[in-house]
Image: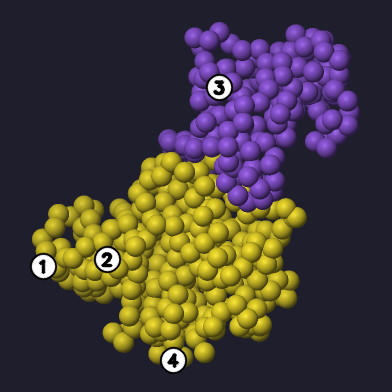
Chain colours: A yellow, B purple
Amino acid sequence: MRDVAIIASAQMANVSTTTATPVEMLLPVINEALANAGMSRADIGFWCHGSCDYMTGQPFSFVMAVDALGAWPPIIESHVEADGAFALYEAWLKIQAGEAETALVFGNGRSSSGDINRTLSLQLDPYVVAPLWPDDRSIAAIQARACLEAGVVTSRQMAAVAVRNHRNAQSNPNALRSGSYSVEGLLDAEVVADPLRALDCPAHADGVTAVILASADTARRLSTRPAWIRGIDHRIDTQNLGNRSMTTLPSAIVAAHKAGVGNDKVDVAELHAPFTHQELLLTAALGLTDATNINPSGGALCANPMMSAGLARLAEAASRIINGTADRAVGHASSGPWMQQNLVCVLEGE
Amino acid sequence: MSEDVLRIRTPIGIHYRYSAGPNASSHLRGLMEGKFIGKRCPSCTLVYMPPRSTCAKCGVLLGEDVEVGPKGTITTFCIVNVAFLGQTIKIPYVAATILIDGADLGMQHLIQECETSDVRMGMRVEPVWKPREEWQPSLANITHFRPTGEPDADFDSFSGQL
């Protein structure tokens, strides 16, 4: 295995809606990531993009996104119809294969172009579930109900997750939602999709994240403290909602084991768990304890930019290695209304 | 014994709010005034018409507005002889790439008011606009391009577009 590190990143400040085109959203973030790494476009060996045409409502919008890259002379570029975190996995493989020494990975989504709850229904089984147009909040509420009934989580724990994330988001300029709340106050709040309250549900956002990867020599030359990828794995559960446990995250458990989360302490974990009960399920699946600082950014609850929120978690985790506030961090990305797909990345400083 | 279900219909539909972005917007506003507004790349100076958000070559935001045209040159074309679903124009017709005077990239439009067999590379053409009261911020304000009757452009003047 080659040593590969995250050396820099950049994010767009999340907004609930924007009139900028995807290319206009991407360009400044890509420029900022390059500047943060002290690199120019010519230094990038591989470009990898995560996005979803259903978000913008334009077929082949990912091809248009190449306009933001300056693809002359020709570049080596790829795309995944998924969160940018999965594009990072592809870029990591590309470097592992010796086909590139550096990669710029980016994820973007303008979910405000359409009705996000309706758009997300299209990721469901197209025969028996999607035609019912269930929104992601309702599906998450079914999972939350099952977890509460099984005693896997409590409403109080869920409220505590919301309180912590919103408090942490106050120091994250990119967060869309933040605030100072109390558990009691949240428990008194109105239920919006029983048993979920508004602050149990993510703040959907338009956003962009860009991350730069480099192989060992380049990483050491450009960064005084690279965030080394010591383990990365992604796994998927069945798409069929009725064929899996609602109270555990089987694919996250496997991915965490394969990535080696439990091999040492975890200082910081950035988790792509859009709903509060999901963060509790994920914390358990990853075997994290109170010793870990979870979601210092406020997490996906306080800004959930489609196709970028997972990559943002990896960027947030890496930034804490790079700035020296953590020695070992976990970044996580997921996909699906019950987190059917999970990517876990273990990052370490030297 | 019941029959197998071999196919189902599950229509999907989502309404989107399309946003052209600031660069394409100045072009669309220009069309409301009967003008072609392109944009110049501040790095390589290419003029994009219609403009995009960025210069695809340089990866920088396009800069100043540049009024171009309205005449142009056919760089390449095809004669459509095949009917297809949703076709609104009577076949045969000519779809062409037109390099608007002052622009550095061709745009697509229809060539009419001449025999399809007369259309050729280098032919000089001009836009035919709908009545002003029907104008929208859309390239559809132009129904088609027609020959101007000017001498053909030199091949060398557009060979870089091919």
The location of residue A105, given as percent across then percent down, is: 57, 64
Mark 3 lies on residue: B31
For discs 3 and 4, the disc positioned in front in the rendered view: 3
Mark 4 lies on residue: A264
Kind of residue sitting beneath label 1:
Glu
Whether residue B102 is situated above or below residue B151 in the rendered picture: below
Mark 2 lies on residue: A170
Q: Chain of mark 2?
A: A
Q: Nearer the viewer, residue B72 or A160?
A: B72
Neighbours of disc 1 within 10 Å: few (<14), some (14-19), many (20+) = few
Kind of residue sitting beneath label 2:
Gln
Give the quarter of the image for residue A290. bottom left
Q: Residue at x 51, y 55 (%)?
A: A28
Neighbours of disc 2 within 10 Å: few (<14), some (14-19), many (20+) = some
Earlier residue among tags 2 and 4: 2
Q: Nearer the viewer, residue A149 or A330?
A: A330
Cα distance in 3D space between marks 4 and 1 = 35 Å
Q: Answer yes or no: are tags 1 and 2 on the same subunit.
A: yes
Kind of residue sitting beneath label 4:
Asp
Instruction: Say which element carries label 3.
Output: helix
Q: Chain of mark 1?
A: A
Residue B106: tell me if it is visible: yes
For discs 2 and 4, the disc positioned in front in the rendered view: 2
Residue A235: tell me if it is visible: no
Q: Residue at x 23, y 59 (%)?
A: A199
Mark 1 lies on residue: A184
